[in-house]
Image (cartoon, grey):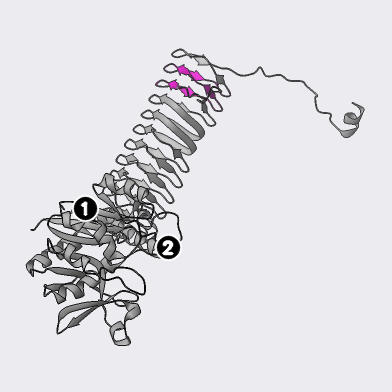
Amino acid sequence: MQEISAIILAAGKGTRMNSPLPKVLHPVAGLPMISYVLSAIRSLEPKECRVVVGHAKNLVQSVVEPLGASCYVQEKQLGTGHAVQMAQPSSMQGHILIVNGDHPLLQAADLQSFVEQFEKQEADVAVLSAEMEEPGAFGRIIRHNGDFRAIVEARHAGKETLEIKEVNTGIYLIRSGLLEDLTSAIEMNAEKEEFYLTDIVDIANEKDYKVLAIPAKNPRVAFGVNTQEELAQASKSIFQAKVKTLMQEGVVVIDPESTYVEPTVRIGPGSVLYPGTFIKGLTTIGHSCVLEPNVFIKNTDIADACQIRAGSYLEDCSISEKAMIGPYARLRPETKIGKDAKVGNFVEMKKVNFGEGSKASHLTYLGDADIGKNVNVGCGTITCNYAANRKKYKTIIKDGVFVGSDTQFVAPVTIGEDAVIGSGSTITKDVPDRALAVARGKQFIKEDYIAKDEDECAES
């Protein structure tokens, strides 16, 4: 295969998005839409990939450069032909692939097939086309006796031309060394005062180059995002594709239409996803787990046979095997839950190591704490980790401790092994191993404090 270089057009503002964010950075199923385009192009192992930026160029640059692309600036928005010129194609090596940055449904197989056909048919210039049931505003592919002659934009097309189903996807492949010559011959459109890349088809035909429109196998390659509605459609398509793949791999999905799993997530066979689950980022979930309805999980590692019960929110944490979380638990970053541990309803943890077999069954906040094995944390327990000096301090609770309900640990404090903390205590000092600690006000009783009837009350 001939060497390939790529140009991605990403300079436009995306006016119809009605958003301050550059169009190509809008998230599709959790990732910037341009990242899908870059991923598809990387499958070709290109010599280089140049992204033409313009609107909010620094933001776009901050996303695409870490993904291996280099940026070239189009200061004035003078059309797609001008944008390609700004990429300085004369200095690029190999055949040049041109793709729009707003085509998130583009896949590696689409481009690989396009390149293979281009080389097999020894084309000089090729456009990837697609058959659309409702072509709408797409430019139409004009053929004469089967030969590709031109692209006619819908707004300039007559009734007969508008009936053509084959459309331009905006994806081009040009033989090495030809692109600079073709784009320099494009004339400005008088109506829009822009240079249209589509004009290279006419120019290449006039120069007797071999020009092809190569039909794509799937019409989704033509799908570009220009509105918020189309953005939602793209996300839905990718979510559904991911869920379909998971089911093929043995994951049980109760309702695929209401289950949202980003492409970067991995889930083991035999796990069950209930409706309303939303799983993001670099999350990994083992086999035989159960995720109940309306669970939100981001960048979290969940081992085998765990149960994440309804309404729980997990972010940047890790869960060991056979643990049970929720319902309605919140695990914040840097929290690690041990094997067979239980984190119950309305429990919040932040930066906690919660040991094997330990339990915090309900209504508890634990932050900046190391909690050992087989610890029982009673209802209403709080680690007071944030001090008046705006610093955070650590609570250490060692193995086997029993913590009575409504306990406050004022950090820094250490509780020794097998200690017992009486309910209602405020613990400010370290507790030795196997000790009982009770720290609460003395109970005071005044009998007959409340009068038996109103007369007695009035007399008093």
Identified at 54% across, 24% down, the residue is 408
Residue 14, disc: none
Residue 392 location (% of width, % of height): 48, 24
Q: In the rendered image, which quarter is residue 40 located in? A: bottom left
Q: Quadrant of residue 209?
A: bottom left
Q: Quadrant of residue 340?
A: top left
The residue at the point 28 percent across, 68 percent down is 222
> Looking at the picture, does residue 176 appear above or below residue 294?
below
Q: Which sits in the foreground, 437 or 180?
A: 180
Judged from this view, the residue extending furthest toward the bottom is 160
Question: Which residue has dot 2 on it?
Answer: 15
Q: Nearer the viewer, residue 223 or 182?
A: 182
The residue segment tinted magenta is: 395-424
Residue 35 among magenta residues: no
What kind of element bears circle 1?
Answer: strand
User: Which residue is at the front of the view, 408 or 205?
Assistant: 205
At mark 2, the secondary structure is: helix
Label 1 neighbour load within 10 Å: few <14, some 14-19, many 20+: many
Residue 79 drawn at (x, y percent)? 32, 65
Structural crowding at the residue carrying mark 2, measured as other residues with C-alpha within 10 Å and reported as few (<14), some (14–19) or many (≥20): few
* Left or right placement of residue 104 versus residue 377 in this view: left
Q: Say which amino acid is labelled 1.
A: Cys
| Residue 297 pos. (x, y %) | 39, 45
Q: Earlier in the sequence, mark 2 or mark 1?
A: 2
In the image, is 388 to the left or to the right of 219? right
The reply to whether the magenta stretch includes residue 404 is yes
* Residue type marked 2: Thr
Residue drawn at the location 41% of the way across and 20% of the way down = 398
Q: Say whether residue 216 is visible.
A: no
Q: Is residue 349 left or right of residue 388?
A: left
Residue topped by disc 1: 49
Residue 150: percent from left, percent from top:
22, 77
